[in-house]
Image: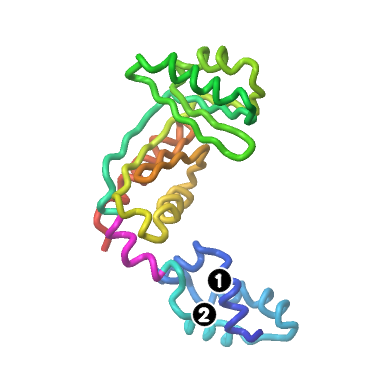
Amino acid sequence: MNIAQVVEKLISQSPFLEEALTDNLINVSSLARKLRPEVEKILKKPVQEGAIVMAINRRAPGYYFKISKGIKTFMSKLGDIIVRSDLSDYSFENSPTLIVCQRNLMDEIRPEKNVFCTFSQGVYETTIVASNSLDQVIERIFIREKMLSQKSGLGSVTIRLPEDNAEISGVYYYILKNLAWGGINICEIISTTNEVSIVFAEEDVHKAFPILLSLKKPHI
């Protein structure tokens, strides 16, 4: 393994770093100085800082560069963005009777027009994100099920995605990257083919919404 290969490996381990390099947001000399100890450790020999700078500058365009040209145009076509508040999150261990409880819940709330309720089933557990007005109903119907966790005081932002979202690489990365850069913690992600709902602590919703809304604006 040579210097260029080691530098490529270290940079590719951090998508944020690769993106910042592509956008010329990082001082290459400072980065080379930081990478030098790790490069020398891997190669087991002294390495000149200038050689690392040269390796960084000569890197071929990476993953972010390949997706960035089309992804920003794609984001400008995002559909409606809907904000919901007063949500609760329940996780239950999967069981043979859990699906019956889900059916009973849907039957009970079917006449309700102003409630939000969604299920996400994994291999070992199922999560319910619902309006907190349904808390007592959920706790009553699922009383015999094993509840793994429960969170209140949540909100969500739902984004309508263009129909060709499955053909564009990096859609979710681009959305989640902007939220991460905003220092916003995500509680849950619920997605369908053309829609994604991201659940946050309620105090974070007002910070997440403008970030997500800005993705629709044309980028230079």
* Secondary structure found at label 2: helix
Rendering quarter of residue 65: bottom left
Front residue (pair 144, 85): 144
Front residue (pair 127, 53): 127
Q: Please tell me how crowded label 1 is: few (under 14), some (14-19), or many (20+) other residues with Cα within 10 Å.
A: some
Segment tinted magenta in the rendering = 65-74
Seen in the picture, residue 48 relative to 34 is either above or below; the reply is: below
Q: Which mark is residue 11?
A: 1
Give the percent coordinates (x, y) of residue 18.
49, 68
Residue type, mark 1 in image = Ile
Seen in the picture, residue 115 relative to 164 is either above or below; the reply is: above
Give the percent coordinates (x, y) of residue 49.
60, 83
Residue type, mark 2 in image = Ile
Give the percent coordinates (x, y) of residue 92.
61, 28
Residue pointed to by mark 2: 56
In primary-sequence order, the first of circles 2 and 1 is: 1
Q: Please tell me how crowded label 2 is: few (under 14), some (14-19), or many (20+) other residues with Cα within 10 Å.
A: many
Give the percent coordinates (x, y) of residue 24.
41, 71
